[in-house]
Amino acid sequence: MKFRLNRIQSIIFTVIYLAVTLLLRLFLEPYLMGYYFISIGIGLYFILLLWVLWHKKVLNFSK
């Protein structure tokens, strides 16, 4: 059995996911002490996870 979200669930999940990851990066920023490439790497990793979910068709944005 495959786990799939419908269109509305996918949009809600994506908005919450992006908000949480952005807040996480903003809270981590002071502890990185100027190492912005680590923050960029973390952001790219989170985007990669989102892309994998879309590529594996867990997230469904089509009608």
Image (cartoon, rainbow, N blue to C red):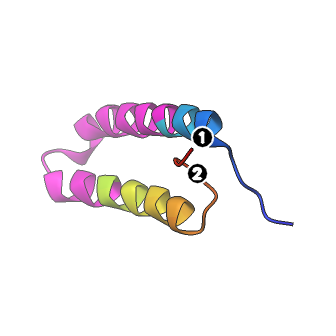
Residue bearing mark 1: 7
Q: Classify 10 Å Cα crowding around label 2: few (below 14), some (14-19), many (20 and above).
A: some
Q: Amino acid at mark 2?
A: Asn
Q: Quadrant of the C terminus?
A: top right
Residue at figure coordinates x 50%, y 40% from the top left: 14
Q: Quadrant of the N terminus?
A: bottom right
* 37 relative to 17 in the view: left or right: left
Q: How many marks?
A: 2
Q: Amino acid at mark 1?
A: Arg
* 35 relative to 9 in the view: left or right: left
- Quarter assignment of residue 7: top right
In the rendered structure, which segment of residues is drawn in magenta?
15-42
Mark toward the start of the polypeptide (1 vs 2): 1
- Identify the secondary structure beneath mark 2: loop
Place of residue 19 in the rendered image (x, y in percent of width and height, measured from the top left): 42, 31
Question: Per the image, is 37 magenta?
Answer: yes
Place of residue 33 in the rendered image (x, y in percent of width and height, measured from the top left): 17, 44
Place of residue 10 in the rendered image (x, y in percent of width and height, measured from the top left): 58, 41
Q: Is residue 61 above or below residue 18?
A: below
Place of residue 44 in the rendered image (x, y in percent of width and height, measured from the top left): 31, 59
- Secondary structure mainly formed by the magenta segment: helix
Residue bearing mark 2: 60
Question: Per the image, is 41 magenta?
Answer: yes
Residue at figure coordinates x 48%, y 61% from the top left: 49
The label number, if any, that marks residue 17 in the structure image? none
- Identify the secondary structure beneath mark 1: helix
Q: Is residue 40 above or below residue 1?
A: above
Query: Circles 1 and 2: CB distance less than 8 Å?
Result: yes
